[in-house]
Amino acid sequence: VGAEASADARTAADFLRQHSGAPPRLAIVLGTGLGGLAEHITGSSVVSYADIPHFPHATVAGHAGRMVLGELQGVPVAAMQGRFHLYEGYAPQQVVLPIRTLRLLGAETLIVTNAAGGLNPAFGAGELMVLSDHIGLATMAGLNPLRGPNDDALGPRFPSLTNAYDANLRAQAHAAARALAIPLHEGVYAMVGGPNYETPAELRFLRAIGADAVGMSTVPEVIAARHSGMRVLAISCITNVTLPADANEPPPEPSHAEVVANAERAGIQLTALVERVVAEMA
C-alpha cells in the first residue's frame, strides 16, 4: 500500500469529487450480471472507468465499467457497475483502487456483491447468500492488496479481519429478506484466482475446508475496505450449483453465459434486498 498506490487513489478521488454532489456515505460494488441496481440511483452522474485517472478497464462480459454517483433511498452512494479481477492481469493494488478511492471520497460502508458457484448442497441456483466469513486462497498465498509498504493514513500495518463482515449489517439483511419473503442463506465464501472454473477435486477440497460458495473476486476489496475502517456487507448470488448431491455424479459443466443469466435473474431480488437495507441506513 505504498505512496504511489495512495497517490493514485487520491488523484482519482479528486477527479470524482468534481462529478458528485454530496460525498457518498455508501460504496456499492455490483458484480457479474448485477449492474441493474444502478438504475435505481437518482440524480445520478455516470463516469466511465476509462475517464477516471489511474482506473483499470473492466474487460469481463456482464460488467459495464462505470461509476454511478447519486442517491439510493435518500443515501448518497457511489456504485461500481463492474469490478476488476486478478485474472484480468491486474495487481491486487489495482483491483482495490476503486475501494480506496471511494473511501477517500467519504464512503463509510461498503456493500459488495458477486456471482458465485454454490458448494453447499442446501443452496439452489438463483438464491442469495450473505457472507459471514471468507477464505481468500489467493490473498493467503501473497496476492494481497496490503502487500508492500503500508500507508498509515489509509490503515494499520496488521489489520484484523476477525469481524470482516459487519454483524449488524448482516442482521439488517436478514430482516429485509424476511420482510420481502426472499430466501437468504448465510455462509463462507472462498476466493480462487480463476479464470478457469474449478476441477471436481478442487470443489471437493473447498467444501471440505468449510466453503459454502466459490468465486473469483470480493476478498481483496473486503480486505482493503476493512484496512481503511469501512463496515462491510457482502452478498453472493448463487448462479450455479457446482457439487451434485450424489458424490458419485460428476459436477455439471459451468459456463459464463449461465452465470450471467442466473445472476441477472437473482439480481431483481438482490436489488430489492439492498434497497431495503439502504433505506434502514437513511
Image (cartoon, rainbow, N blue to C red):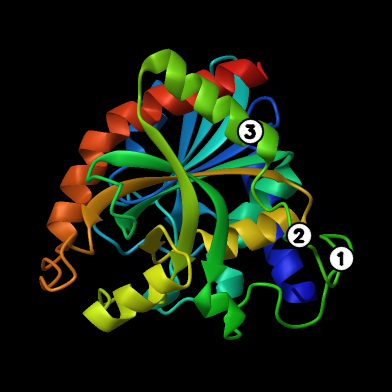
Closest to the camera, between mark 1 and mark 3, is 3
* For marks 3 and 2 on the same chain, the one whose residue lies earlier in the sequence: 3
Q: Which residue is mark 2?
A: 227
Toward which corner of the image does residue 195 lie, by quadrant? bottom left
Tag 3–tag 2 contact (CB < 8 Å): no
Closest to the camera, between mark 3 and mark 2, is 3
Observer able to see residue 107: no
Q: CA distance from mark 3 to mark 2?
A: 18 Å
**For the C terminus, which image quadrant?**
top right
Binning the other alpha carbons within 10 Å of mark 2 as few (below 14), some (14 to 19) or many (20 upward) gives many
Which three-letter amino acid code belongs to the residue tagged 2? His
Binning the other alpha carbons within 10 Å of mark 3 as few (below 14), some (14 to 19) or many (20 upward) gives many
Binning the other alpha carbons within 10 Å of mark 1 as few (below 14), some (14 to 19) or many (20 upward) gives some
**Residue at point 11%, 66% (across, down):** 252
Total marks drawn?
A: 3
Q: Which residue is mark 1?
A: 156
**Residue at point 58%, 76% (across, down):** 139
Camera-nearest residue between 134 and 265: 134
Position of residue 137 relative to residue 234, above or below, is below
* SS for dot 1: loop
**Residue at point 62%, 25% (across, down):** 76
Toward which corner of the image does residue 243 lie, by quadrant? bottom left
Tag 2–tag 1 contact (CB < 8 Å): yes
Q: Which mark is residue 98?
A: none
Horizontal arrangement in the rendering, residue 180 relative to residue 44 (left or right): left
Position of residue 49 relative to residue 157, above or below, is above
**Residue at point 62%, 21% (across, down):** 75
Q: Which residue is mark 3?
A: 169
Toward which corner of the image does residue 215 lie, by quadrant? bottom left
Which three-letter amino acid code belongs to the residue tagged 1? Pro
Which three-letter amino acid code belongs to the residue tagged 3? Leu
Residue 203 on image: x %, y %: 31, 73
